[in-house]
Image (tube, rainbow, N blue to C red):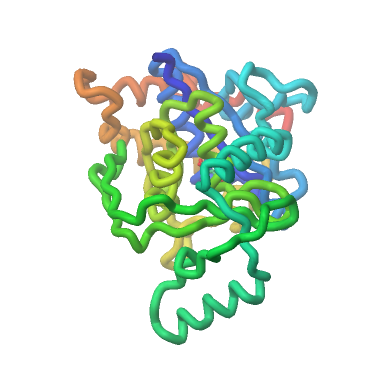
Amino acid sequence: MTIRTRFAPSPTGYIHVGNVRTALYTYLIARKHQGNFILRIEDTDQARFVEGAEELILKTLNWLGLDWDEGPNLNNDKEIGNFGPYHQTDRREIYLKWAKKMIDEELAYADPYTPEQVQAFRDQAKSEKRAFLYRDHRPENPPEWQLGMPLRFKVPEIKRYSWQDAVMGELSAGPEALDDFILIKADGLPTYNFAHIIDDFEMKITHVIRGSEYIASTPKYLSLYEALKIEPPILAHVPHIMAPTGNKKLGKREELFWDIAPWGKRRKRQILYVINCECGEMSVWQLDADEPSPRDEVCEVCGRVLFDADGNAMQPLEKEFI
Ligand code: GLU
């Protein structure tokens, strides 16, 4: 089996050191196993689109030497790879095809309520101090779905899920984690929840490495994988990098990563700091049981990606940007 990993950023904010760390792990796993590293741009959230964010993603990966085998081209011309397109907004037909299949199999239904009605359900649940679950409001006779209406997943079986996370170990969550989430929004674009499952499957992704904020939604994804009869990829959720102030994770809209000279030394120091701190933790990876701890190898690869023979940071593009 060819190991295929993907880095799948959304251009809804500027790439920061936490994203870079995820990209690095994703890259190293692919390279360590002579696999493929794919770059996919998850640009379906048009409301939060940030101009220039995608360009920074490409330049940053390039600057760090994290070359991708498939994905958008740095020069913004033709994409590379046989599993494209690699921008989600160019994959609408693919999501619609899957959506139709799900409607036919009674795994999806049109949401007949207005956003105000859904909000009223939510408010009511809050006033009664219970969690809002859309599935409690599943309509008996939903209208025929057409573009312009949200399409929801009809969770086929409400149950507890337990699963193995490559970093976090054994995890589980009860039925309260499952809900009839939106697959296609009223604007005709898919949600992240739907699109990434379809894309990972169609792009033959074997390992999904991403931030731990996605653990809470994993039971929903497992339910969708099961409904679609898709074998889930190996899931690896990495802990957050915390913001320098306050007890919260570093967010895309904070400027830790981008506040000094755009391509300057401070940023490189931040990256090196993170890599230094994190290499030790890479030993938690267990891609297959017979492997020795990959720590040394990973550090060695980190070294090759980010340092020259004397241990100095490599500067492939820096001069150009300072
Ligand atoms: N587009 C998601 C983000 O930027 C990616 C999550 C994932 O890797 O699946 O957070």
Tell me if I can see residue 79 in this picture.
yes
Q: Quadrant of residue 100?
A: top right
Q: Residue at x 51, y 47 (%)?
A: 107
Q: Position of residue 259 (x, y in %)?
A: 64, 52
Residue 266 appears in the rendering: no
Q: Residue furthest front?
A: 141
Front residue (pair 251, 312): 251
Please name whichever residue, 149 or 218, is drawn nearer the observer in this view of the structure. 149
Residue 255, how many percent across, how many down? 61, 55
Q: Is residue 52 left or right of residue 265?
A: right
The quarter of the picture where the N terminus appears is top left
Q: Farthest right residue?
A: 77
Residue 62 location, x and y as percent? Answer: 63, 27
Indicate the position of residue 71 as horizontal and vertical percent values. Answer: 64, 25
Q: Residue at x 29, y 35 (%)?
A: 280
* 291 lies above or below 213: above
